[in-house]
Amino acid sequence: MKLAVLFSGGKDSIYAAWLVKKHRHEISCLVSIWSENKDSFMFHTPRIEMTKKQAELMKIPLIVQKTKGKKEIELKDLEKAIKKAVSEFKIEGVVTGAVESVYQSTRIQKICNKLKIECFNPLWQKNQIELLNDLLKENFEVVISSVAAHPLDEKWIGRKIDGNFIKDVEKLKEKWGINPAGEGGEFESLVLDCPLFSKGLRIK
Amino acid sequence: MKELLVVSVCKEKLHELEFVDPVTDILQGADINFFVRHYSKIKKEDLIHSNKIIICGTSLQDNNFVEDIKSFGWLKSFKKPVLGICAGMQILGLIFGGKIDDKGEVGFYFENFKKEFLGLNGKKEVYHLHNRYVSGWGRDWEVFAEGNEIVQAVKHREKDLYGVLFHPEVRNKKTILEFVKE
């Protein structure tokens, strides 16, 4: 099946893309929404411009759609981008990295349903610690690109997701109830390398 | 030893990560022995070997199971407990004489359970993901919840056959464990 992956450059969307590949579907294009609203509930914003470089490393065409990020209107911009993927790449479905967010997933489900295309959420309801461990098993190199919840502070930015990271977020889950994979927006991530990249990405 | 059979109705294997794995994760977490089969590959021995069955849901655009409804003919004479989730409920309805109608619900909704149904009672929030539902449930079925003019939860009056149109694996995980305990 020809699929488009909704692509933020973070761990969930790229791991979802990897699962698409493992299931032998074609990733015909990536769709990235660049929102001006830093507080968007719908779209990941930190370092979103890195999606261009990541798409190059994946050798997959990227559709970039800019949006002001106003609630619900941003969905029209998302729909526009998906329609472009349908017309230009003949995609038959969209893939998201949604794990727990009903807010995001229902909105994407409704757009796909309206366009009569499939919607895949391969990480849906996945245990978050298991998800972090899967990233390590599959050789994903991921760093934290922003934090937005106590007690995470600037010291966490740039930190790699590894065994120690997982132990630390498990402790924070116990003590503060944070989502260990950042599903509640506690942190955002950036993938520097993974099996889909032709080579690793280096950042300053 | 007999095990719980989890039935996939997904046309695409990739969709099993979304509709089957969340159910098997709940079973695994409760140390329940289970095995998974796609409906097209169920053999007589699988039905004999199972002690209960959960038929999972599938995506909004996937209606292959309706075209293949004859594959579920075994449900008519099956004597063990079955829980049909979304597509699984539609399958139970079709096999027992109901018909499919169109009406979509996507996201969180409140449903009112008029009496206890697999641990759900009164007004409860559930997660919906369907374009279709079953109408014409016969007298053999008791309706436990009805909302938006759609039957949302049913149980056969004589057999242990349960149907839910919502996805308990998302926000009502205990409902699945209640079925396992029944």
Image (cartoon, helix red, strand yellow):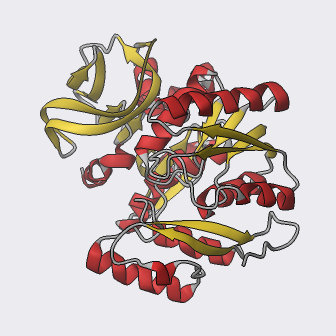
Q: Report the front residue among A7 and B9.
A: A7
- Percent across and percent down for residue A6 are 65, 45
**Vertical order, B23 against B144 (above or below):** below
- Percent across and percent down for residue A72 are 46, 31
Can residue B126 be spotted in the picture?
Answer: yes
Query: Does A41 sit left or right of B117 as displayed?
Result: right
- Percent across and percent down for residue B71 are 59, 28
**Vertical order, B122 against B34 (above or below):** above
Name the residue located 88 percent from the left edge and 67 percent from the top edge: A198
The quadrant of the picture occupied by the N terminus of chain A is top right
Quarter assignment of residue B86: top left
Can residue B55 be spotted in the picture?
Answer: no
Q: Report the front residue among B118 and B49.
A: B118
- Percent across and percent down for residue B31 are 38, 69
Count of marks, rendered view: 0
Query: Does B12 sit left or right of A153 as displayed?
Result: right
Q: Report the front residue among B90 and A141.
A: A141
Name the residue located 59 percent from the left edge and 79 percent from the top edge: A158
Name the residue located 84 percent from the left edge and 45 percent from the top edge: A61
Q: Report the front residue among A86 and B31.
A: A86
**Vertical order, B11 against A24 (above or below):** above
Name the residue located 64 percent from the left edge and 78 percent from the top edge: A136
The quadrant of the picture occupied by the C terminus of chain A is bottom right
Residue positioned most to the bottom: A164
